[in-house]
Image (cartoon, rainbow, N blue to C red):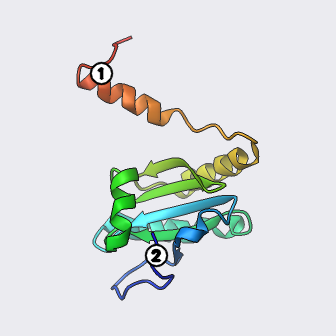
Amino acid sequence: MGGSREQAPTMWAPSSLAVKADDLGNYPVLVLHCWAEWDQPDREMSRRLDVVTSPYADRICFRSCDIDVPENLPFFLSRLANIPALVCFIRGEWFETVVGLRSEDELRSLFDRWLAAAVDPVPRRPRTASGLVALVGRLLGRGSRS
């Protein structure tokens, strides 16, 4: 995630600036749109983000991350299962990853929830990650079936 703020020449890219490593610690809430030029749903996600981010621009930093840029690949492989994805960082720490195209109302709800979590002295991550791990464990026969 260390490339320059300028996007590599492409046929399409989101309107948000490319993320830089020093962005993570400089904003109370940073939302990273992970995308690829070849992924059609990313274009619609970007359009929806353009519609809904304006009222949040003074409280949330919006950035983008092209997963096809070689230096971004380790981040993608360590944090994401698919794209489009939104990755929320609160005070420089990973908070939540949401994968898949979301409606404008869903995006607003996510942003409101992330802003609320940012004012909590110890933000509590959603339980979805642990639920997913438990589900995968059950599917693989490694967990309890309670």
Task: Kindly give the residue lying farthest to the left in the view shown.
Answer: 140
Q: Residue 3 in the image: x percent, y percent?
A: 44, 78
Disc 2, SS: loop
The Cα–Cα distance between marks 2 and 1, rounded to whole angstroms, is 38 Å
Q: Amino acid at mark 1?
A: Arg
Q: Residue 7 in the image: x percent, y percent?
A: 43, 83
Task: Kindly give the residue lying farthest to the bottom in the view shown.
Answer: 9
Instruction: Decide if residue 34 is on the left or right side of residue 110.
Output: left
Disc 1, SS: helix
Identity of the residue drawn at 32% across and 68% down: 40
Instruction: Decide if residue 4 is on the left or right side of residue 93.
Output: left
Q: Which mark is residue 138?
A: 1
Identity of the residue drawn at 69% across and 44% down: 117
> Is residue 67 in view from this perspective?
yes
Q: Which mark is residue 128?
A: none
Q: Which mark is residue 14?
A: 2
Establish if 79 lies above or below 38. Answer: above
Identity of the residue drawn at 64% across and 67% down: 61
Q: Residue 127 in the image: x percent, y percent?
A: 52, 32
Looking at marks 2 and 1 on the same chain, the residue that comes earlier in the sequence is marked by 2
Q: Residue 58 in the image: x percent, y percent?
A: 74, 68
- Location of the N terminus (image quadrant): bottom left
> Is residue 83 in view from this perspective?
no
